[in-house]
Amino acid sequence: MSLFSSGKKKKDGPAAPEQSVSVSADADTVTHTNVDPQTANEKLQKRSEKAEKELAKAKENLAKEKSAKRKLYSSLVKLANELKRTRAETETLLDAAKYADRNWYDGGMWRGPELLPGALDTAPKRTTREAVSLSDLFLDLVIVIAFTRVGVAVQNRGTIDAPILAYFAIFWFIWGKEASYSTRFDTTDLSSQAETLLTCFAVLFGSLSSTGDFQSADGTCMMAVGCFVAILHFLLYFRVWVWFRYTERTSELFAVKMYAIFTMFMTFCEAAIWLVGIFALPEDFEHRGYIFVAGLVFSMRVPKAFLPNDFHAASSKRGVLFILLLGFILQSVVLAATPFFEYYNPNTEQYLFLGFACLLLFCIKLLYVDDSFSIDPQDHALLVNRAAGFIFHFGQFFLLMSTTVLGAGLDLLTHNYLAATAALSDNSKNLVCGGFSAVVLFIALIKSMHLRRVPNDPGKRNWFVAAYTVQIIFLFAVVFTSAQMCLAKDGPLKYLMMSEIEMLAVLSGFAFLLVVMSWLDEAVELTIYGEGEDAREFRVHPFGLWWCLQPEDPIVEEMVQEPATADGRLAALSPLLGSSVANLGYSSMDLYQDQDGVGSARSFGQATSADAGQMA
């Protein structure tokens, strides 16, 4: 700092007082020692206010920059996820198309077992290959013939007893074994075709013995059928185990090996139980029914066990089997009427009778859940948890059983009507009314096992809840009325059963009413949203009627409960948007900070790939 004199010194006079000026390091700031303190404070306050304004403006600009980078980052994470998902779906579709276009003998006529394309994917995907092959369709026809043979036993006895349920379950589980294999492995090689043919032989021969009791030669024959098919599938999965026996635990194909071992154990135990019942116990053994129970227990399969299957193919197979059963019932009605029409032409009333029978079966077809299209895979009972999947299979079994009973009753009803029987047979009345009531009830049970989605908006949600409530009320009213028609001997309901055609007309009307009520929630959806695509963006709140409808997988549960908007999905699936930090383009500015205000520096490429992997 420099000091300058304010004036010249006189030679003889005393020195004048000096006035010093101090210059700070800041060239723009000059401080005089004799400046008033109040003035200095005012200047300092102004400079402080100016600095605060500049700092606030800088923070605002920084916040805008962070917001812009946050939006850009979110968009890029979403884009990366969509690209990864599209790539995975494209690869699956290409593999499926390649599989569908190849010749059946590629790789050898007796080649080893091959997994279907996409069989290891946990998320169900539609493929281009056929869901039901011609060989599967032929097996379905044989199974339906066996079901109708059990229906003959129902006609003869007029009721359902333990042997009827056991024999029907044997045929049902044989179909389930075949469907379980064909929805996971390739079945176009000759070894699989030969196994399917042998299974058809066993089911066809066994159907001829499906009308006897447990303590009879027919019961022994049915045990032999179950034992033979169990041994076939033991050998089939032993072949799979041999092919994949060297698979390491870290490989994704290890699940195939474990599934083969599990199925081999179950089929071995099942075959051993049947062999004990055939050779170790006498034919007139009093407790022979317990052998059937034990064999059927080991015929069951745990839902979602070890290896996923082709969800859409399995759904199509269930639908085809049910439609074939309805077709056979309609055919049996026509065949029962054919001998009468050989001698005279049918009149108007008889045409109406056949028309009501066709309308009844058609309405049942409409009530049936086509879960390959009408239900989202993540909402399906089989993919929610094992308890829901078990109850779903339980409902499917008794739906087919009750449909068979209905068909047996319609056959008797047709014969009684055309034979001009004076009084309505109790057997035909009980079988038709009871079968119809059970069919409606089990269809409702199957539907109730799926998750339902309603809007998040409370006002719109009330519309859907009201629609479902009305459906439930009408459903139980129809089930109760038709069950009372089956049980009542007199009373007001007897006027609904004065004749065969009147009773059939009433049941057809009930079925048509239920079909109209089943469209109520779709009508509410169209009224509120107008388009189904728009409705999917809002119908995101899931609910179920049963305690077991809770997703076992927490990731699936998170996806089920999240809103359908893009931001909601991103916030739920990407933890980086909540508490993590990222560095955009290797810049030094942190986009996010954690609760302590400490940021981390990592590249955007690393963050994007990590988020995309978590989201997928």
Image (cartoon, rainbow, N blue to C red):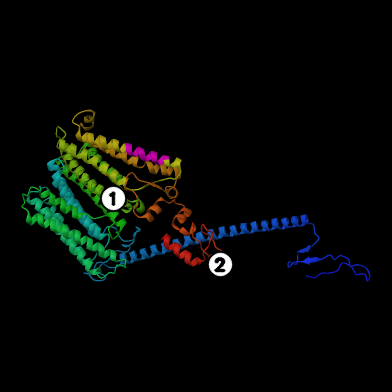
Q: Amino acid at mark 1?
A: Ala
408 or 217: nearer the viewer = 217
**Highlighted range, magenta:** 462-473
User: Which secondary structure, mark 2?
Assistant: loop
457 or 95: nearer the viewer = 457
Crowd band around label 2 with a 10 angstrom C-alpha radius: few (<14), some (14–19), many (20+): few
Instruction: Find residue 454 and report its horizontal and vertical position in percent.
Output: 41, 45
Instruction: Find residue 52 and report its horizontal and vertical position in percent.
Output: 67, 56
The reply, left or right, for residue 522 in relation to residue 110 is right
Instruction: Find residue 331 and report its horizontal and vertical position in percent.
Output: 20, 47
Q: Which mark is residue 587?
A: 2
The reply, left or right, for residue 254 in relation to residue 145 is right
Residue linked to disc 1? 387
Q: Name the N-terminal-most of marks 1 and 2.
A: 1
**Up-down: is 616 above or below 375?**
below
Quarter containing the N terminus: bottom right
Residue under the point 78% across and 66% down: 22
User: Which secondary structure, mark 1?
Assistant: helix
- Outermost residue on the top side: it is 491
CA gap between label 1 and label 2 equals 51 Å
Q: Amino acid at mark 2?
A: Ser
Residue under the point 17% across and 47% down: 165
* Residue 423 part of the magenta segment: no
Q: How many marks?
A: 2
